[in-house]
Amino acid sequence: MMKKIKIIEVGPRDGLQNLETFVPTDKKIALIKKLAGAGLKEIQIGSFVSPQSIAQFRDIEEVAKAVRRLRSVVPSALVPNRRGAEKALACGISRLIFFFSVSSKHNYANVKQSPQDSLKELKNICRTYTDLASTSIRVDLATAFGCPFAGNVTTAAVLRMVEKVAALGVQEITLCDTVGFGHPKAVEEKFRKCFRLFPEIRFGAHFHNTRGLAQANALRAWDIGIRSFDSSVGGLGGCPYAPGSSGNVATEDLVYLFESMGIKTGMDLKKLLNICAWLKQILPQAKLSGSLFQAGLPRTHKLSC
Amino acid sequence: MMKKIKIIEVGPRDGLQNLETFVPTDKKIALIKKLAGAGLKEIQIGSFVSPQSIAQFRDIEEVAKAVRRLRSVVPSALVPNRRGAEKALACGISRLIFFFSVSSKHNYANVKQSPQDSLKELKNICRTYTDLASTSIRVDLATAFGCPFAGNVTTAAVLRMVEKVAALGVQEITLCDTVGFGHPKAVEEKFRKCFRLFPEIRFGAHFHNTRGLAQANALRAWDIGIRSFDSSVGGLGGCPYAPGSSGNVATEDLVYLFESMGIKTGMDLKKLLNICAWLKQILPQAKLSGSLFQAGLPRTHKLSC
C-alpha cells in the first residue's frame, strides 16, 4: 500500500469562510505564501462564490492572481457552479473543488438547491473540464458522516452519491465530516465500501475536530488506506452548528500525528507553528483550536521532519 | 479478544491535584457520588500523600470514609509509599494505586527519590498486601511515553521497569502518558512488547490529551487489546509542563469514542455531561477541556448508551 501522504491546506478557504471580520487581501496572500513555504503542496485559496453568499471571498480573484504562479504549490478553489468554475479558470486556477451535500437539507441550506441540481451543475462543469487537459476536478461530498439537520447519513446514501459523481468521469472524491459527526467505525465502514465499489476513484478525507475525534478518525482512515487529508492551519475555523467548538483538524496537529508515527509529510512543523503565532497576532478574533500550538512540541520531537 | 471495556475515573485525583483552589470536602464527595451514578465502576478518589506535598488532598481521609461503602463502585486511591498505603487501608480503601516514574528525573521531581527507591517502597507495600486477601494493587508507570525533563523514554526502559514490578507479584500495571508525549506508534510498540513479554500482567492505559492525541492513542490501544483506560470527567486537570493545554482525556469524550464504535461502556453520557455542567458552576476556575461538553452530542447519537 502506498505510504506517501498528501496533506491539503484548507485554512484560507474553510478556515476563513466563517470569520465575520474581513481578512485583508494582502494578509490572505501572505498566509498562502507562508503555507507554501512550510511545505504545503496544495492549498485551497478560497471559494468562487458570489460576495452576497460569502463576503470573505469578495477578493478571491485578486488572491488567485497573486498566488497562481507560486512555485511548488497547486492552488485550488471551491466552485459551487459552472459560473464559479469559469471565473476560477479565468484567474488561472485550474484545480477546482466542486462541493455539495449528501444530505438534501444541508445542501438546500448551503447552496439553496437539491443534491440532484448540484449534480447537474457538476455535469456542466465536467463537460467544460473534459475539454481542458490542464484542469483537474475534485468533488467534496459534504455531511458524508452526518447532518446537523437530518442527523444520520447512511453509508448507502454516500455510496449512491459517489456512484453518480463517478458516472460523470470524476476521479477524486473527498468524504467530508462537515460538522464533526464522524467516528472511527463510520470512517472504516464508509471508506472501505467506497474502496471496494469504486476502486478507480482516489478518495480523500476531510475531518473536523468538533467532538475531538478528528485525529482518531485520521488514524483509522490512514490504517485502511486513505492518503489524502484536508486540514486547516491552527485549526482555523469553527463549526457554525456547535458554537465555540473546534473546526477543521489543525494542519500542525495532523502533521504531528503522522510525523510522530514515522510517516513523512514533507512539512516543516516549526514553520507551521510560526504561522499559528502570526495568525494569532493578525487575527486575534479567530479561534485557534489546535492542540500543538497551545502545548508546544514535546522535548522528544525532532523539529526537522 | 475480550471486548468489554473498563473506564476508570481519575478526575477526583488527577483532575483536582493541580488545582490551586481547595475544593471543599462535600463537593469532592458529591463529585464521586455523581460519577458513580453515571456508571463509573472504579473511581480514584484522591491521593494519600502528605498535605505539604499536595494540599488538595488534606481531606482524603474524610472523603475516603464518606465514599468507601458506595454501591457498585470501587474507590481507589494513590499511595506513594507504605505509610500512604496503611492510611488508605485504615480508611477502608482497599484498592491501592502505587505510582512512580520510569524517568529518574521526573521521579525525583515528583516524589523526591529514585525509581529504585520507589521500587523498595513498592516491595514494602506488596509484603503488606500479600497478607490481605481483600486488597488489590495496581502500579502506574509515569512518563512511560516521555519525560518533560529527560525527553525520550525508551520501550526498553519501560520493559525493564515492568519486569521489576512484575517480579514483586503485581498483576496490574498501567502505562501513563503523564505529559502527553505519546502517539499511536509508541502506544502500539510499547503495549505490544508488554503483552508479549508479560502475558500474565493486566495492562492499562492512562492518556493525556496535551497535544490532542489522546483519542487516537486510545483507539490504537483498543485495537491492540488494551481494555482498561483512565480518564477524567470534563477533561478536568491540566499539564503543569504545558500551561493552558488539555490534561487527562475527558471521560465523556472517551465514552463517546467507544460508544460511537458500538463498544458498550455502561456509562450514561447525558449524566456525564450534566456533571460537566455542574463542575463548571462549582469550579469556575477549573479548565474543562473536553470536546463533547463544548460541542454537545450530535443529532445522530442515541443518549441511552
Image (cartoon, coloured by chain):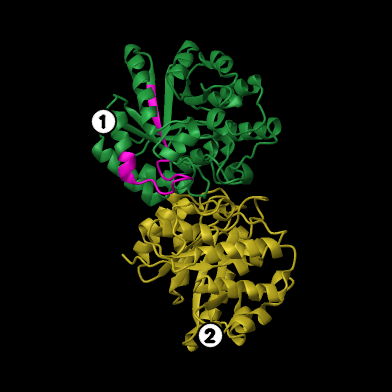
Chain colours: A green, B yellow
- Distance from disc 1 to disc 2, alpha carbons, whole Å, reads 65 Å
Tell me what residue is drawn at x 51 percent, y 73 percent: B42
Q: Where residue A200 is drawn, which disc sits there? A: 1
Q: Which residues are magenta?
A: A137-159
Q: Secondary structure at mark 1?
A: loop
The three-letter code of the residue at mark 1 reads Glu
Tell me what residue is drawn at x 35 percent, y 65 percent: B3
Q: Residues within 10 Å of mark 2 (few under 14, many from 20)?
A: some
Q: Is A139 in the magenta?
A: yes
Q: Is residue B30 left or right of residue A193?
A: right
Q: Is B197 in the magenta?
A: no
The one nearer the camera, A299 or A251, is A251
Tell me what residue is drawn at x 38 percent, y 42 percent: A222
In the rendered image, which quarter is residue B197 located in?
Answer: bottom left
The one nearer the camera, B72 or B165, is B72
Residue at mark 2: chain? B
Residue at mark 1: chain? A
- Name the residue tied to disc 2: B128
Say yes or no: labels 1 and 2 on the same chain.
Answer: no
